[in-house]
Image (tube, coloured by chain):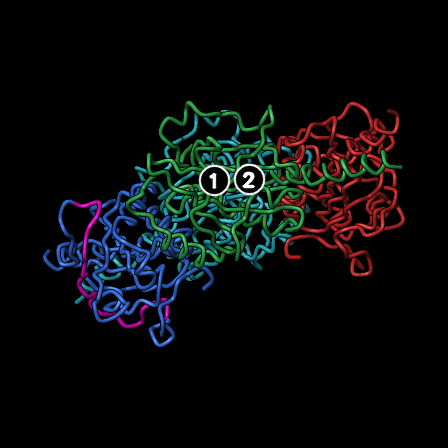
Chain colours: A red, B green, C blue, D cyan
Amino acid sequence: MKGSRERPGADRVRRSLLMTTQSTAPELLVDRWFNTDHPLTLAGLRGRVVVLAAFQVLCPNSIASGVPQARRIYETFAPSDVAVIGMHTTFEHHDAFNSAVLKAFIQEYRLKFPIALDQPNPAGPIPHTMERYQMRGTPSLVLIDRHGMVRKHAFGAVDDLRIGAEIGALTQEAAAAAAVARSSAA
Amino acid sequence: MKGSRERPGADRVRRSLLMTTQSTAPELLVDRWFNTDHPLTLAGLRGRVVVLAAFQVLCPNSIASGVPQARRIYETFAPSDVAVIGMHTTFEHHDAFNSAVLKAFIQEYRLKFPIALDQPNPAGPIPHTMERYQMRGTPSLVLIDRHGMVRKHAFGAVDDLRIGAEIGALTQEAAAAAAVARSSAA
Amino acid sequence: MKGSRERPGADRVRRSLLMTTQSTAPELLVDRWFNTDHPLTLAGLRGRVVVLAAFQVLCPNSIASGVPQARRIYETFAPSDVAVIGMHTTFEHHDAFNSAVLKAFIQEYRLKFPIALDQPNPAGPIPHTMERYQMRGTPSLVLIDRHGMVRKHAFGAVDDLRIGAEIGALTQEAAAAAAVARSSAA
Amino acid sequence: MKGSRERPGADRVRRSLLMTTQSTAPELLVDRWFNTDHPLTLAGLRGRVVVLAAFQVLCPNSIASGVPQARRIYETFAPSDVAVIGMHTTFEHHDAFNSAVLKAFIQEYRLKFPIALDQPNPAGPIPHTMERYQMRGTPSLVLIDRHGMVRKHAFGAVDDLRIGAEIGALTQEAAAAAAVARSSAA
């Protein structure tokens, strides 16, 4: 995908955009957090839909489409329903990048949602969270439902209308579950 | 709203974008249909979410944002879940407009979803469906849920992410209802 | 070109975008003028660069790119240097189109530059000016220099930067000629 | 200007977009060059129009509008007529930025035109070329004519049509001058 950044060997990683089988979202491994006064965990966000938006400052499609879309999602949904997390998965240009670059980027782009720096792996270029999620590159978008299951995993640009529909549908699942619970209890 | 077309006296019509109280969607009154071999009715579409997209060929915002968004909605959702209906609400330029203009427009823009020509009212400039829905002008977007209730009524440009979320949520309500029904039956 | 409208047999018409040989621009044949209190002629505009922008109201690329670019050109250059003329070359949908449609279109899109309705040819679908200029379809853009010579003839979307450069260069030619004249006279 | 980056005290620097008085363009002071096998100088480019595009990797408007426009200018004009030079004027985030960031940026955005890293000033945050040109911030665009005179100095987003016209006009000035020279010699 032109302008997106793909990791080496990404063709051996999952290519399908929509999850057919669901799996529990692996916990995040984070080196440093921005825009939050305490580290976030998926366990702590259980009950909310989580939007995990992986990006790199030096990836053109991350800047042109991934990060702006994450910002729009953050501005559209209620935080109590949908938690947006940016994740800088540094898998290339390790010599150029440093956390001061990310800090300046967040400041200049006036991003307000929590952003994590993916934990580097001393044994190789791919950081831990990126590896756990088997991301193909950046930008990547992962939707996690209220029960902590991965429900979508996309690489590259994603359509606003479709992603809006998918997040909207995920937010309703709890209502459905709650309705069933209320109905059963009655 | 710049480029949108507002009917005379529209300031006396409902301005809120999101319906706080729900009301049953009035049936459509149509002069002529395109892109369907039989007339459509809301009654016949009960069980599906209906997206009613009002527009005019000579309204700049209809052409720049309303019609393209209706097309994207049509291409994003399964027709069995979401029915998109374009409605040409001719409330101005009656001397210039005729159904051949609409036919040529549909052909040139390669629109595939059903499109209706709102039934004119001999007693005034506002056609019947537009009047029944108290639309402020074009483009207008109305979301009708699976039970035939109006759930959103917007005038002017609408954000893709938000409208996607709202339609996505509406499509899930049936699942919720069905889940309750299944649970109750068990 | 997707969304542009090509006349029948257009493949037998000139395809090159940039004129290698120059020819005198044929005079305009016009049925009706808008946005001017008197009919315009190329003869009367000699000394100015003329931008002739052919379009149709029912041609998607005319509305999305041709007409907005003509408006930007009109707003960018001094009228004493560059005359912009819109030309509605109705070569299809004759049953649907009428001059009231064009009038309403000009009003709704708030176009301020002179716009002509190309003179129909009773003997066929292609109106006279379109035929004289051998236009392939709409949108078409013709640049005429200060001496009345055709210097560019483009079909479909044209890049703003390039067309700006070409018009900018044409406006300077007179300065060059005047400088030569002054130098010779001295 | 939202998204652009302004230097401290920029309000005391020239604000007019178009130069009324012309001045000789100061020579560039450069720390490091990319995309050229030898250092460039304005003296060496005399005879060509020079487009100097100042930017910063961590400036949103530089990435969204300044750098893409510089690329389009580079792709539109013949290099023998118009020389495009990108200039990274690091005047903030000195702790985050380093030349490896710029190198990676150039690679990822596939920029092909010569790009310079402005020479830092040990005495303060504003690098030397930026200071000499009294740039207000990034993105800034400077047009230098074939005689080495500054003819335009803009801060923030610049319209493609207008900048195209201005560069196109500048390229023609030499033709005018040459025509005068030829005429005088005859």
Q: What stretch is highlighted in magenta?
A: C16-36
**Residue depicted at 42% across the width and 62% down the height:** D78
Task: Please name the residue that numbered disc 2 is placed on.
Answer: D89
Mark 1, secondary structure of its residue: strand
Pointer 1 and pointer 2: residues touching (CB < 8 Å)? yes
Amino acid on which disc 1 is placed? Ser
Q: Residue flagged by tag 2: what amino acid is it?
A: Thr
- Quarter of the image for residue C75 reads top left
Sort mark 1 into few (<14), some (14-19) or many (20+) by Cα contacts within 10 Å: many
User: Can residue B174 be found in the magenta stretch?
Assistant: no
User: Total marks drawn?
Assistant: 2
Quadrant assignment, res D182: bottom left
| Quadrant of the frame with the N terminus of chain C | bottom left
Q: Where is residue C96 in the image (x, y as percent from the top left)?
A: 33, 56
Can you identify the residue that label 1 sits on?
Answer: D140
Q: Position of residue D35 (x, y in %)?
A: 58, 56
Instruction: Please tell me whether residue C20 belongs to the stretch shown in magenta.
Output: yes
Do dots 1 and 2 share one subunit? yes
